[in-house]
Each structure stands twice: as C-alpha cells, then as structure tokens.
Amino acid sequence: MKEITAIIRRDKLPETKKALDDLGYPSLTIQSVEGRGKQRGAMCGEMDSEMPDSFCTAVKLKATPSAYALDHTLPKVALFVPKRQLTIVVPDDVVTTVVKSIIKTNKTGKAGDGKIFVSPIEGALRVRTGEKNGEAIA
C-alpha cells in the first residue's frame, strides 16, 4: 500500500475528485492548507529563474503572516498561497495510474500546479469492522 499526498490548486479540487472517483478510488481526505514553493508566495504569472525583489500585488490575496513574521520585523510580507491537500491510500499496483490521473487533471504548465508525494504504508485497520490492510482501504 502507498499513501499519495497531492497538494493542488483549490479550483482543481472538483475535477480531481471526479477523476479519482472515475478510477474507482473515491475515498480520500481533503485539507485546506497554505504554503509556498520556489516562488516564495509570489503569484504573478510566469516566473523567471530570478526571484522578484518584491511580492506581486496584482493578485488580491489576504496575506497570512508566518508565526516567525508575527514576532520579527521582516522587509516584506511572507505570503502563503491557499491550496488543497488530498491524501489517498491505494494498493501498490495502481499508484502510477492514480498519480498520472492527478497530474493530468492538475497540470496547467504554470508555477503553482502543485506537488505529489508517495509514501509507503505499513498497515491499515478499519476501526468499525477490524478489517486490515487492503480490505481496510477498499
């Protein structure tokens, strides 16, 4: 079994849920998360290899300061971009299919399309019935 964690754009959530459902994997956990990648929270279209000196003001986002920023003086606000984090546990033999489906659904070719992490799962247990491992994730 593998755990697939995908961090995607918020507006891609309905399409992603449908794609997973169409594959036969409707069970997942969804969380609202905030973070930043190589762009350091800047969201002005295509980013070149050099980081901008200041954050883009063209996108109207409410700045969410980090805990560090609340206690320290920073030269600029550190933006965290709102995203959705999906977690799904699948059998080993379908990991590639599920990951390819998530990529196909979420790829726009622009910065901020997201990340996917795949981790091994040692075991699973369904609390209600006591089913274990593969039976517990079905």
Image (tube, rainbow, N blue to C red):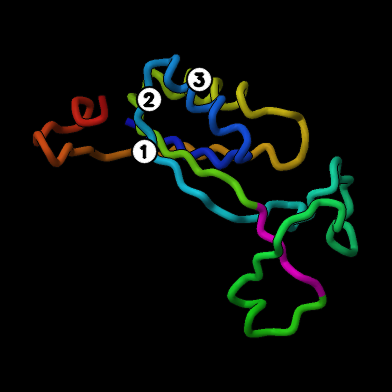
Which amino acid type is shown beneath numbered disc 1?
Answer: Pro
Please give the residue where the numbered disc 2 appears in the rendered image. Answer: 26
Q: Position of residue 121 (x, y in %)?
A: 31, 39
Q: Secondary structure under badge 1?
A: strand
Tag shown at residue 19: 3
Q: CA distance from mark 2 to mark 1?
A: 20 Å
Disc 2 residue type (three-letter): Pro
Q: Give the Cα separation between the discs numbered 3 and 2.
A: 9 Å
Return the disc, 3 or 1, that comes first in the chain's sequence: 3
Coordinates of residue 128 in the picture (x, y in percent): 12, 38
| Helix, strand or loop status at disc 2 | loop
**In-image side of 114 versus 58 (left or right):** left
Q: Earlier in the sequence, mark 2 or mark 1?
A: 2
* Comes first in the chain, label 3 or label 2: 3
Mark 3 → mark 1, Cα distance in angstroms:
23 Å
Tell me the number on the disc at residue 54.
Answer: none
Q: Name the outermost residue toward the left.
A: 130
Checking the image for residue 120, the label placed there is 1
The residue located at (74%, 84%) in the rendering is: 73
Q: Is residue 84 above or below residue 64?
A: above
Q: Quadrant of the N terminus?
A: top left
Write the residue at 36% across / 38% down. Answer: 120
Q: Are marks 2 and 1 in contact (CB under 8 Å)?
A: no
Q: Which residues are magenta?
A: 76-81
User: Which element is circle 3 on?
Assistant: helix
In the image, residue 86 lies at what x, y percent? 47, 39
| Amino acid identity at mark 3 | Ala
Considering the whole magenta stretch, tell me its main secondary structure.
Answer: loop
Foreground label between 3 and 1: 3
Along the line of sight, the residue nearer the viewer: 3 or 65: 65
Q: Residue at x 25, y 24 (%)?
A: 138
Which one is closest to the eye, mark 2 or mark 1?
Answer: 2
